[in-house]
Amino acid sequence: MGGADLIGILGASLRRNVMGMLKADLEAAGFELIETHISWVFLGAADVFKVKRPVDLGFLDFTTLEKRREACDAEVRLNRRLAPEVYIDVVPITLNAEGVHEIAGRGTAVEWAVHMRRLPVERRADELLQAGRLEPRHVDLLASHVSRFHEGARCDTETSRHGDVVTIRHNVKENFDQTRTSIGDYLNPEQARQIEAWQLHVLEDEDRFTARVDAGRVRDGHGDLRLEHVYFGSDESITIIDCIEFNERFRYGDVAADIAFLSMDLAWHGRVDLAERFLARYARESNDYDLYSVVNFYESYRAFVRGKVASLLADDAEASTAARERARREARRYFMLALAYERPPLVPPRVVAVGGMIASGKSSTAATVGSLLAAPVVSSDRTRKHLMGRTPTESMRSGAWSGAYSPSATEAVYEELWRLADVVLSSGRPVVLDASFRTAAMRDAARRLANRHGIPFLLVECSAPRELTRERLASRERVATHESDARADLFDEFERQFEPIDELASTEHFRLDTSRGRDENRQRLEAILES
């Protein structure tokens, strides 16, 4: 049944001007009703109509027709950023001279609805996950997509003020205040106190949040970035719907708060491995490894928000019994996840440095290690170009040990590597470092970083026959862009400067011949990482 049929059913129902009857008629006609705490969403075969509920929940107010119209307009405008083909228009529900209600008809508008194009539910991320079809490649594509969205998102004085601790603390306290009388239905008093005490304690370290504002990481984001709002096309395109339109302070915020919603959601569905992979990939694509300084806080915060929203629906007398029971189960699970802020990491923290000669296969090996550990990979090539204000594939070629590759520039790159790795490790996660580590001093610095955190250290030394490395370097000459600027003319000089790795114990040093098959080397790396 198409949009015209749906409009006809809506018109017939609205003549009676009773929302309860409207809902009953739509369900009887085969349309699915999705009830949220703020909307009635009617799903037809090809179209969706979303009607705002006339509610005042403190953080939103839809109690007047004008406010509901403004919210509908904002929803269409803002969501066209990530779903331009989905959000069609805002349509009036009208009352004509004959006293008949119509959708987009003649007469006075008595209600408003957002008209959307329906997307195939089987392509929704949570459905793919449930069916076992959400793959690591989907997570990687999503991380890149969200990173590009954030890069182009609004960032100014107004958005930035929502990243200061005063504003964040207000949001956090509001969550606790709004659940003060209901939280006991889901957690015992001590559990509730633990969540509140921990989140407020993190906010006492204001510097970490101020640094995020100063770095331009507080932007006009999505605000409700969860799996059920993400759709993957058969061509691997991505559509994201349902951003927050009703309250800017829930949409303006740290990009880490946006991505924490997705990582928290993946963890809630039991896929911590994909949650960590998503964070790692986003950090790489955005060069935002500092997100690890705040992401644990935001994951707990987002879980509590979802628990609060579910608890509101659970207490809604107008919702169906089934919807209320489902909401109660979800609320308890989300609140428990918010409590699990100190959950054991998927893989214990450690430092894995991947080094070797140029064109020895370091970056592909580091990517494999990162995948095995679900850990972020911090690359010297990408870090160098970020520090120089260049894109990852923009060439900065110069003579050996000059320009962007001078000793002083290289020292600054490695200092940034240590800093970023320290941020990741402090969040309780492992980190992979992708660099040449051509001197004993560089390797010693990486080892000392691990020692400061009291965690294991491993250097994976990549090697390959000279003929193969020269062949790889020659292939780079045929590629317009490459993250590494190293070419064949640097090979001999680099080889002369490379200090043999003979200072590490065998337990901290593993040689990998990258001329072997990829699957074989993945198995070898997996074995050494598990030993």
Image (tube, rainbow, N blue to C red):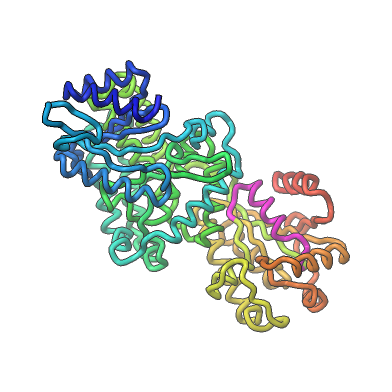
Q: Is residue 334 left or right of residue 419?
A: left
Q: Which residues are magenta?
A: 358-376
The residue lying at 58 percent from left, 43 percent from top is: 235
The residue lying at 57 percent from left, 72 percent from top is: 415
How many badges with numbers are in the image?
A: 0
The answer to whether 94 is drawn above or below residue 283 in the figure is above
Q: Is residue 501 visible?
A: no
The residue lying at 80 percent from left, 56 percent from top is: 514
Within the magenta stretch, is there residue 359?
Answer: yes
The answer to whether 19 is drawn above or below residue 111 in the figure is above
Residue 428 image offset from top left, x and y in percent: 52, 51
Occupied quadrant, residue 457: bottom right
Q: Is residue 34 left or right of residue 232?
A: left
Given residues 442 and 271, the one toward you in this image is 271
Q: Is residue 277 left or right of residue 12?
A: right
Within the magenta stretch, is there residue 497?
Answer: no
The residue lying at 28 percent from left, 53 percent from top is: 249
Given residues 240 and 31, the one toward you in this image is 31
